[in-house]
Image (cartoon, rainbow, N blue to C red):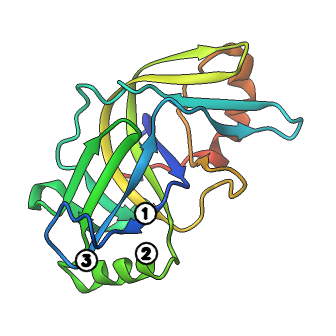
Amino acid sequence: MPFKTDREYRALAAPLSVQAATKRIDTEYYVEGYATTFDKPYLLYEFEDGTKFYERIDAHALDGADMSDVIMQYDHEGRVFARQSNKTLLLIPDHRGLLIAADLGKTDLARGLYQDIEAGMITKMSWAFRVQEESYDRATRTRTILKIKKVYDVSAVSIPANGDTEISARSFASRSYEAEKQERLYKRVQLLKIRASL
């Protein structure tokens, strides 16, 4: 199957938690968490020689982004557990990042995911998006995502790509940010990309 080359995924160690007291959706199977955070650089990738590249999501990157009918999945694959169009998923950009709130009570499988989250088996989140505008600081090796064109999904994830960091890359864009890292990224892209088929 062909891969969508401009869709990016990020695993994030921000908690996906069961919040009984502060329900934004009226259900006993309520979860909320952050699919991404803003203005906090995180380690995107570290090469064998110790060279590190970072990424930062600008606080205004979601301004004007297409967030229509985003879905919630597990590990960015298969089953849809919640979605905006049936009002089981809310996306709320706030001062910290992209807050999600979901009702996981509509199907048996969704309730199973809720139970895994409630039991602390799944505590991480990720998101899939397309970048519209970015910049790169060669001195700090930091890519800043200035504008997101579209958000495809938010996902509960089992294991982030790098468990030693609070957030780690699941993939990054196939296009280069600077010539300095293009050659290395090209060699590693097959290991780092997770692409969703259309």
Precedes in sequence: disc 1 or disc 3: 1
Q: Is residue 73 above or below residue 51?
A: below
- Characterize the local packing of mark 1: few (<14), some (14-19) or many (20 or more) Cα atoms within 10 angstroms: many
Q: Is residue 115 above or below residue 169?
A: below
- Left or right of residue 173: residue 110: left
The image shows residue 24 at horizontal and vertical percentages of 19, 60
The image shows residue 56 at horizontal and vertical percentages of 54, 29
Q: Report the front residue among 162 and 22.
A: 22
Precedes in sequence: disc 1 or disc 2: 1
Q: Which residue is mark 1?
A: 16
Q: Report the front residue among 190 and 9.
A: 9
Query: Which residue is at a point 31% across and 53% down the rendered structure image?
Result: 100
Residue 117 numbered mark, or none: 2
SS at badge 1: strand
Residue 66: quadrant of the picture: top left
Precedes in sequence: disc 3 or disc 2: 3
Residue reaching furthest to the right? 49
Residue 29 numbered mark, or none: 3
SS at badge 2: helix
Mark 1 → mark 3, Cα distance in angstroms: 13 Å
Q: Amino acid at mark 1?
A: Leu
Query: Which residue is at a point 73% across and 25% down the rendered structure image?
Result: 183
